[in-house]
């Protein structure tokens, strides 16, 4: 149980275009999802916290107008990188916390490799 | 500032040996710690966790030790196997943080056959 999927797994786009990444909890409801970014040989950096039905909370230094997050249902959150540039190339990973439980455990998706040309 | 870090960025061991990966944290309010394994090109995989009211927890071939006095966390892997080769991250969270995780820098474990 507690499987999280991401789609697409890999995307290559031209500079200036927008890219949408989906994060789904497959066998549980996730009231809270998190989006991370990971550059090569570095750790995961939290970008934002997404709560179902409310606006996302962004970490300091993350542009909310550039990284649009929508958490429309208990099993789906989306991250849209708007007007992507080469410096946005990174590994984007989502995680989900099981809803309704007093637990801190997060389950991670497999990640999405974004390359902006 | 508040941070979670690792002492050793790389660790190379022989197959069958025991591995110890260390992690230091600076926030005394941290009350929940997790070790994750990340293979190349994949998302982090939960290994084991421990709460601040414990100092040791064991799983299958893995043990996590927590020393709150010196704010130190370690992951011990028994009889390390080639499949254990990966980057290992410690992460911490604390009450009132909305379950946000702060990750350490990571240690690359290489198991030589």
Image (cartoon, coloured by chain):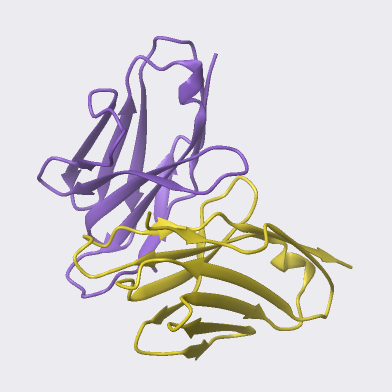
Q: Nearer the viewer, residue A24 or B72?
A: B72
The answer to whether residue A82 is left or right of residue A32 is right
| Residue at figure coordinates x 23%, y 61% from the top left | B97
Q: Is residue A52 above or below residue A64?
A: below
Count of number-bearing discs: 0
Give the image location of residue B38, x and y in percent: 58, 57
Q: Is residue B65 above or below residue A104?
A: below
Q: Colour of chain B?
A: yellow
The answer to whether residue A109 is left or right of residue B112 is left
- Residue B59 lies in quadrant: bottom right
| Residue at figure coordinates x 81%, y 80% from the top left | B17
Q: Is residue A58 above or below residue A51?
A: above
Give the image location of residue A100, x and y in percent: 17, 70
The answer to whether residue A54 is left or right of residue B26 is left
Could you tell me if residue B56 is visible in this image? yes
Which residue is situated farthest in the left direction here? A53
Q: Is residue B54 above or below residue A13?
A: below
In the rendered image, what is the letter of the chain coloured purple? A
Give the image location of residue B65, x and y in percent: 53, 84
- Residue A85 lies in quadrant: top left
Query: Which quarter of the figure is the C terminus of chain A placed in?
Result: top right
Query: Which quarter of the figure is the N terminus of chain A placed in?
Result: bottom left
| Residue at figure coordinates x 51%, y 32% from the top left | A90
Which residue is situated farthest in the right direction here? B113
- Residue A78 lies in quadrant: top left
The answer to whether residue A66 is left or right of residue B10 is left
Give the image location of residue A32, x and y in percent: 23, 55
């Amino acid at each position: 149980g507690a499987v999280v999927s991401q789609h697409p797994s890999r995307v290559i786009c031209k500079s200036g275009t927008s890219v949408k990444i989906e994060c789904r909890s497959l066998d549980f409801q996730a009231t809270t999802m998190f989006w991370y970014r990971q550059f090569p040989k570095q750790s995961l950096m939290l970008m934002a916290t997404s709560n179902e039905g409310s606006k996302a909370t962004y970490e300091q230094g993350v542009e909310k107008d550039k990284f649009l997050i929508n958490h429309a249902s208990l099993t789906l959150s989306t991250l849209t990188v708007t007007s992507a540039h080469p410096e946005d190339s990174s590994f984007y990973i989502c995680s989900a916390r099981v809803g309704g439980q007093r637990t801190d455990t997060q389950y991670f998706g497999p990640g999405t490799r974004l390359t902006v040309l | 500032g508040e941070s979670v870090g690792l002492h050793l960025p790389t660790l190379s061991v022989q197959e069958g040996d025991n591995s110890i990966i260390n992690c230091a944290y600076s926030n005394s309010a941290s009350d929940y710690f997790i070790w994750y394994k990340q293979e190349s090109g994949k998302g982090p995989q939960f290994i084991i966790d421990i709460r601040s009211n414990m100092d040791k927890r064991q799983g299958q071939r893995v043990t996590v030790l927590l020393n709150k006095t010196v704010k130190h966390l370690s992951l011990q892997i028994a009889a390390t196997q080639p499949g254990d080769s990966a980057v290992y991250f410690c992460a911490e969270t604390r009450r009132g943080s909305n379950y946000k995780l702060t990750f350490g820098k990571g240690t690359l474990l290489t198991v030589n056959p």
